Amino acid sequence: MNLSSTAFSDGEAIPSPFTCSGRDIAPSLSISDVPGQAKSLSLIMDDPDAPVGTFVHWVVWNIPPDAKELGHGINKGVQGMTDFGRIGYGGPCPPSGKHRYYFKLYALDCMLQLSEHAGKRELEQAMKGHILAQAQLMGTYTR
């Protein structure tokens, strides 16, 4: 399974429009090579370099397994609660220094039954034992 973006390459800087310094919109993500037996996809975006510990910027689940794109203007799946205290994407916004932002995509053998107010912890718990494949894309950002 592969996850990529037209906005930035793995390990490169995330452009300003996708951050709190810009329009704070989700970058376009391209999904490919999903296992045929997948029933749904889930996505977690987080920042392990945050001063308070890993900070969650985006969680999405029950994305159709045939989805080829995800991001700004593409509403697929159920978006959950971030550490910003709201539902939906929250772009990079580090208080200082260069931070890494991981977009982690999971192919699952089931659909998930979660409240839209669920966050990363609940999503990870629900995915246990159901992950068929995973892919990752990492971008950086410095304000």
Image: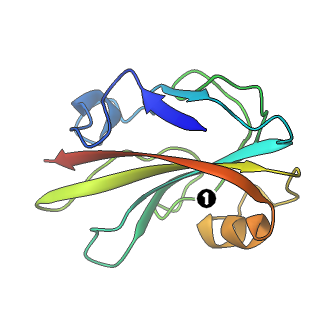
In this rendering, is residue 27 above or below 50? above
Check disc 1 and report its element: helix, strand or loop: loop
Q: Is residue 22 above or below residue 78?
A: above
Disc 1 crowd, CA 10 A, few/some/many (<14, 14-19, 20+):
many
Q: Amino acid at mark 1?
A: Met
Where on the picture, by quarter, is residue 32?
top right
Residue 105 shows in this picture: no
Q: Quadrant of the N terminus?
A: top right
33 lies left or right of 143: right
Residue 143 image point, x, y percent: 13, 47
Give the percent coordinates (x, y) of residue 34: 70, 35
Q: Which of the two residues, 90 or 140, is positioned nearer the viewer here?
A: 140
Residue at (75, 70) in percent of width and height: 128
Query: In which image quadrant can residue 6 be found?
Result: top left
x and y percentages locating residue 116 in the rendered image: 75, 55
> In the shown orientation, is residue 140 left or right of residue 110?
left
Which residue is at a point 43% across and 47% down the rendered structure image? 90
User: Looking at the image, can residue 56 be seen?
Assistant: yes
Q: Position of residue 134 (x, y in %)?
A: 61, 50
Disc 1 designates what residue?
Answer: 81
Question: In the rendered view, would you say 48 is above or below 11?
Answer: below
